[in-house]
Image: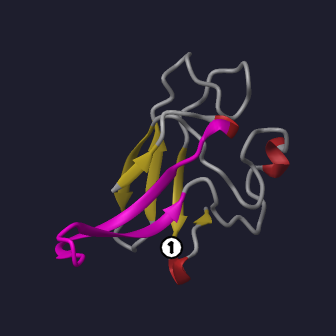
């Protein structure tokens, strides 16, 4: 499940992926959700993206996926997650203020409960 706000760049507050087991409820009868990855705080020790453009918003460690329209989440066979944004061309500019966003896709390795940009 994806929980996201309607903002981008530094205004982004919530871009989180949760797992939800429809068979589990809390003591009040509500479904429980477990955080899988916070897309605004993805571990990026190798610094993917910094060399190409260190001035882009959200590039570095941690890496941030601050897009308004994070709309795709696919669990791959090996357990990693593929996530992508709809760039709303030319309306949004989350990476480069004043420049329309490209479509971005991330594959996130969730081993040891930490997201890693690949």
Residue depicted at x 84% and y 44%:
54
Side of 53 where 93 appears, left or right: left
What is the residue that sits farthest to the bottom in this orientation? 112
Front position in the image: 88 or 12? 12
Q: Quadrant of residue 114?
A: bottom right
The answer to whether residue 33 is above or below residue 67 is below
Majority SS type along the magenta span: strand
Side of 63 where 111 appears, left or right: left
Q: Quadrant of residue 100?
A: top right
Q: Secondary structure at mark 1?
A: loop
Residue depicted at x 74% and y 49%:
59
The answer to whether residue 18 is above or below residue 114 is above
- The residue wearing badge 1 is 110
Side of 16 where 2 appears, left or right: left
What is the residue that sits farthest to the front in this orientation? 28
Counting from the top left corner in percent of width and height, residue 1 is at: 33, 56
Counting from the top left corner in percent of width and height, residue 91 is at: 55, 17
Specify whether residue 29 is painted magenta: yes
Q: Which quadrant is home to the C terminus? A: bottom right
Residue segment shown in magenta = 11-38
Tell me, what colour scheme is on the image? secondary structure
Counting from the top left corner in percent of width and height, residue 31 is at: 23, 67
Front position in the image: 77 or 108? 108
Front position in the image: 5 or 17? 5
Mark 1, Cα crowd under 10 Å, few <14 / some 14-19 / many 20+, is some
How many badges with numbers are in the image?
Answer: 1
């Amino acid at each position: 499940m994806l929980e996201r706000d309607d903002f981008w760049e530094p205004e982004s507050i919530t871009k989180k992926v949760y797992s939800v087991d429809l068979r589990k409820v809390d003591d009040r009868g509500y479904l429980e959700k477990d955080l899988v990855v916070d897309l605004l705080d993805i571990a990026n020790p190798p610094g993917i993206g910094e060399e190409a453009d260190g001035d882009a918003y959200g590039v570095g460690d941690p890496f941030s996926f601050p897009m308004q329209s994070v709309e795709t989440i696919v669990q791959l066979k090996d357990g990693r997650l593929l996530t992508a944004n709809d760039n709303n061309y030319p309306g949004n500019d989350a990476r480069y203020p004043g420049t329309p966003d490209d479509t971005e896709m991330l594959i996130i390795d969730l081993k040891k409960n930490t997201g890693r940009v690949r």
